[in-house]
Image (cartoon, rainbow, N blue to C red):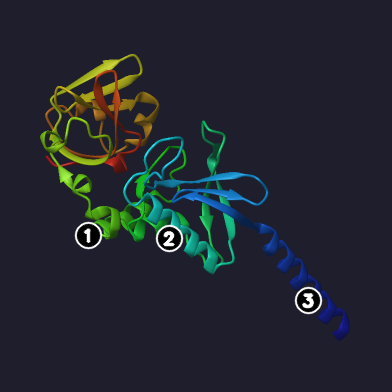
């Protein structure tokens, strides 16, 4: 009986170990601070963050882009490039990359690590919002310490008038919403003549503590990527963590 129990326990341990090993994937290549290539051929986009771009397709790299990628490579190398994936509720992006939270064997959430060390900003795409509070907290800590990307002038809280008219990229803007326009299934919040916040109505259900349509004349801080479109500059608002209401 003793030997039977002993072999039974050993068998369970062997099965458990093989299952644990099978859960881990090998990273073959790091494209940049938020995108990986696995040995099995899958391209992984880390959920919840956006790292500075590296030079590609004749486009210039952004400041800290190369460094963010290098820091991610160094981190993964410490763990023999072995990662565990937690696939998002929405599993693929429009580029057919697999969307996942990536974890190391000691439990480190790679997205949170990148945020905590100032190598990336939060970028929330519902419905993949599982760890959003942890990511916001990590980003705030990096901001307070002005780590790496947070040393840049354009990453400080600015008014729209302080931005160069040619600037596109990550911003934190403090402004008063002058007007709200509703077009089809989209809300547009006007900050000045050229800068707008765009909120598609499909994301409104995440705003449970207030109605975005009631924000006219409110002073706010908005965080996100500022992009040019048809002579205007637009920040897409997808989740309430991007916006603080000041009054």
Q: Earlier in the sequence, mark 1 or mark 3?
A: 3
Real-space Cα distance between discs 1 and 3? 50 Å
Indicate which disc residue 217 carries: none
Q: Is residue 25 visible?
A: yes
Q: Vertical placement of 163 versus 122: above or below?
A: above
Which quarter of the image is occupied by the C terminus? top left
**Residue beneath disc 3:** 9
Could you tell me residue 166's position as x and y percent?
Answer: 21, 31
**Residue beneath disc 1:** 144
Q: Helix, strand or loop at disc 2?
A: helix
Which quarter of the image is occupied by the N terminus? bottom right
Could you tell me residue 84's position as x and y percent?
Answer: 59, 57
Label 1 neighbourhood size at 10 Å, few (<14), some (14-19), many (20+)? few
Could you tell me residue 139's position as x and y percent?
Answer: 31, 54
Real-space Cα distance between discs 2 and 3? 41 Å
Indicate which disc residue 71 carries: 2
């Amino acid at each position: 009986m003793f030997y039977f129990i002993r072999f039974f326990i050993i068998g369970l341990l062997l099965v458990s170990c093989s299952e644990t090993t099978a859960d881990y994937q090998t990273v073959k290549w790091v494209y940049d601070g938020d995108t990986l290539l696995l040995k099995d051929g899958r391209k992984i986009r880390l959920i919840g963050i956006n790292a500075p771009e590296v030079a590609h397709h004749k486009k210039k790299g952004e400041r800290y882009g190369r460094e963010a990628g290098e820091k991610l490579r160094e981190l993964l190398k410490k763990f023999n490039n072995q990662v565990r994936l937690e696939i998002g509720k929405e599993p693929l992006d429009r580029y057919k990359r697999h969307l996942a939270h990536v974890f190391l064997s000691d439990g480190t959430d790679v997205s949170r690590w990148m945020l905590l060390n100032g190598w990336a900003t939060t970028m929330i795409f519902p419905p993949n919002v599982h760890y959003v509070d942890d990511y916001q907290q990590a980003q705030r800590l990096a901001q307070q310490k002005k780590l790496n990307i947070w040393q840049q002038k354009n990453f400080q809280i600015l008014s729209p008038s302080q931005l160069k008219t040619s600037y596109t990229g990550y911003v934190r803007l403090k402004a008063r919403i002058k007007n709200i326009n509703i077009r089809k299934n989209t809300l547009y919040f006007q900050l000045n003549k050229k800068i707008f916040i765009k909120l598609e109505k499909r994301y409104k259900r995440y705003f449970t503590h207030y109605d975005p349509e009631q924000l006219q004349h409110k002073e706010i801080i908005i965080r996100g990527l500022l992009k040019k479109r048809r002579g205007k500059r637009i920040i897409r608002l997808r989740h309430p963590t991007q916006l603080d209401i000041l009054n």
